[in-house]
Image: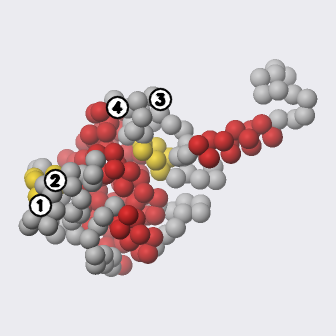
Amino acid sequence: MASQEPLLGSSVHDAAQRAADLLAVLLPGPGRPAGPAALITVLRKYGEPEPIEISAADLAELRHAAHLLREVFAAGDAGTAADRLNGLLASRAHPPRLTSHGGTSGWHVHVDGDDDAPWAEWFLTSSCLSLAVLLAERQAPPGGFCASPSCGKPFVNVGRGTSRRYCSAACGTRERVARHRAIPAGRSETAVP
């Protein structure tokens, strides 16, 4: 089922964030929700029209697509991310086309096979398109995985500054506090043994 969100979501950034949010429920990880209910919640959050029906086969194909897309988020530099995106787009995407889903939505771009493409095809191709545009816009990897060992959640880099290491300020703060507490009393982090 193809999304009816306008122009890659309401923005390229929204479509890229949707990709990260879908990865978070499709890939295993600590404290992450899993299963069709969590997936449907994310699809609703991004405006997917009802009814949203995800079969067991759809879920398996979506998880496979998520593992392919994971490699883009895991890329350490823009060149590697671009190579991975180019490979996925070359092997999975169709020529860009505009659709309004028969007038039920605003015009927007799709690179999946048709308006009724399978969920996994739509997810992978629309995510690759938005992440490619984001990479070109920032000239940096479009996303990453939280460096906190207790999290590992995917996130999108949308700012103009340096790439993030953590999915949120809370994870970054938690890791800084943990490093600080691991330092023996009377020693500073910068002290040389």
- Asked whether the residues under the numbered discs 1 and 2 touch, taking CB atoms below 8 Å apart as contact, a structural biologist would say yes
- Report which residue position mark 2 lands on: 108
- Asked whether the residues under the numbered discs 4 and 2 touch, taking CB atoms below 8 Å apart as contact, a structural biologist would say no
Q: Secondary structure at mark 4?
A: helix
Marked residue nearer the N-terminal end (1 or 2): 1
Marked residue nearer the N-terminal end (3 or 4): 4
The residue located at (24%, 59%) in the rendering is 5
- Report which residue position mark 3 lands on: 162
- Report which residue position mark 4 lands on: 138
> x and y percent of residue 43 in the render?
35, 66
Q: Nearer the viewer, mark 1 or mark 4?
A: 1
Seen in the picture, residue 154 relative to 115 is either above or below; the reply is: above
Marked residue nearer the N-terminal end (4 or 2): 2
Marked residue nearer the N-terminal end (2 or 3): 2
Q: Nearer the viewer, residue 126 or 75?
A: 126
The residue located at (46%, 47%) in the rendering is 155
| Cα–Cα span, label 3 and label 1 | 37 Å
Q: Secondary structure at mark 1?
A: loop
Q: Amino acid at mark 1?
A: Ser
Seen in the picture, residue 72 relative to 78 is either above or below; the reply is: below
